[in-house]
Image (cartoon, helix red, strand yellow):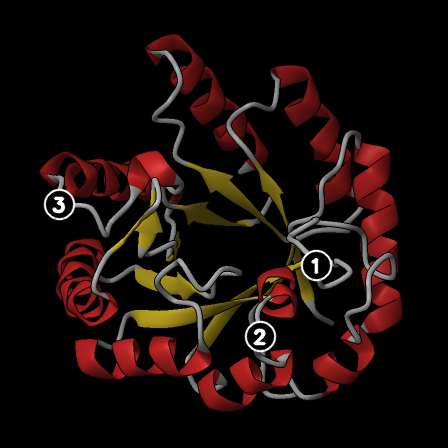
Amino acid sequence: MIRKCFTINQNRTTEEFQSYHTLFEKGLFQAIEIFYPYDKTIEEMKTYEQNVHDLMKYPIEVVLHLPHGPNSDLCDDQEETIERFKKAIDFSKQFSVKKLTLHLGYVTKNGVTKDREKLFLKSVQTVKTLAKYAYPANIMIENMPDIHEMGYSPNEIKRLIDEVQLPNVKFILDFGHANVSEYPIESYIDLLKDHLYHMHIHDNDGTRDQHKPLGQGNISFKILFKKLTNYHELYCLEILYQTVEDLIQYENDLNQYV
């Protein structure tokens, strides 16, 4: 039996959190992926924390997505960004998190393209710093959908993991991001399967990152999942959803593909 997960961003209300309890009571999911709510007020952050703790009365695993987006760009020369990531890692410890999802940052931003090789070498040092700080938790590098982002190609991610040379630096495969890229999804699996530690599962039509339900895009999940016979970690749905009924449907959909 596979272990299933879904994401809960920092904008979800207490009422929504309470509705998720039924998912664990019924054994439909075994994990959640949460976010560091740095952009919320202190009170909102406390509420989010408490809602996550309330779900942990069930025997679930908690994964944490580190800060991401233009305001949390590790390719920028901002010490405060590194400090934000360290605070996110500190935040994760209360939930016994062992998996931390990482976006590396942007090669091109605000119309300016930087030297990719220089940014790559900087990323190696940044990932080393964060991985050492997070140990024994694992830093998982996510493949990105746009060539203007670091961590775009399978080879770039593999080279980075090889150069960092730390046992707690892993790979997270985002199916939707891979489908938008110029590389076949199989190439990420084939090259990085020995480092694969987590997955974000959602569909799209190949033109842009859409976070659609499985079967509403053109990703061949049945074929791809068959290549993952040695994968025993979480299957995490990163599909846009509104209600708990949506999540029940998406969990059922996933069962049809695995």
Residue displayed at 57% across by 49% down: 60
Q: Which residue is mark 3?
A: 77
Q: Decide: marks 2, 3 in contact (CB < 8 A)?
A: no
Q: Decide: marks 1, 2 in contact (CB < 8 A)?
A: no
Residue 105, given in percent of the width and then of the height, sits at 32, 52
Per the rendering, the mark at residue 207 is 1
Number of the front mark, 2 or 3: 2
Marks 2 and 3, the one that precedes in the sequence: 3
Which part of the image, by quadrant, shows the N terminus? bottom right
Judged left or right of residue 29, residue 251 is right
Residue displayed at 50% across by 40% down: 34
Between 233 and 129, which is closer to the camera in this rendering?
A: 129
Q: Secondary structure at mark 3?
A: loop
Marks 1 and 3, the one that precedes in the sequence: 3
Could you tell me the amino acid type at mark 2? Glu
Q: Which residue is mark 2?
A: 182
